[in-house]
Amino acid sequence: MATFSVKIISTQQVTHDVKCFRIEKPEGYKYTPGQATDVSINKPGWENETRPFTFTSLNSDAYLEFTIKRYNNVTNQLHQLVTGDELIIRDVWGAIEYKGPGYFIAGGAGITPFIAILRELYQQKKLDGNSLFFSNKTAADIIYKDELIHMLGENARFILTREENIHIDKAFLLAKIPDFNKHFYVCGPDKMIQDINATLEGLGVQAESLIFEK
């Protein structure tokens, strides 16, 4: 597997625990929205501590962008990095691929594979027929809220599990989704993906219409 050492161009705080990193793009490096790569920090003792991140930039951008939530692991160390520090990235691999209009269902940092997909569709004026349900604990946790509203308008809906005690369950899906014969893109914590996929299948969604990171 090829590896590339790349410098951080800029960092930006997105929420209280999410940071956006823009880094150098190796010549000839290509990917599609929804794809990911394994990333590590180019410092002694950290080079082999890889974590998978999906690109939130588009292939047409002159830089690579990752939007990373801080946990008590490698991501905590990543959040300490500054412009000029180096990362190691590897070959891209498939995560979630856009297959047509439908419903994007995301939990927390699970929005990241959808960001590049939605940005590209918006750029191409092909967002019609797509809706987003984005679940977070609180309003302070919502990643790129303003941009999502700008792109999707009223088709961007935000669910706050702690502040409003609302969850994306069977009752919610039945109330909010008029047509289950569409594609469903699901990303978030493993249990959320399992529960939502099982619920959608129980509501008649075909397995081939469920798109999630396997």
Image (tube, helix red, strand yellow):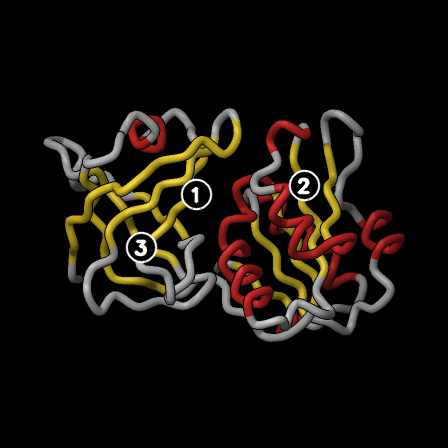
Q: Is residue 189 left or right of residue 180?
A: left
* Front: mark 3 or 1: 3
**The N terminus appears in which quarter of the rendering?**
bottom left
Q: Nearer the viewer, mark 1 or mark 2?
A: 1
The residue identified by callout 3 is 63
Which numbered dot is residue 67? 1
Residue under numbered circle 2: 135
Query: Where residue 174 appears, x then y in whole percent?
Result: 87, 55
Identify which residue, 10 or 15, lies in the foreground: 10
| 87 lies left or right of 20 | left
Q: Is residue 165 left or right of residue 42?
A: right
Residue sitting at x 50%, y 55%? 113
The x, y position of residue 108, in whole percent, is: 58, 39
Q: Compared to 118, does 170 lie above or below?
A: above
Element assignment for label 2: strand
Q: Quadrant of residue 86?
A: top left
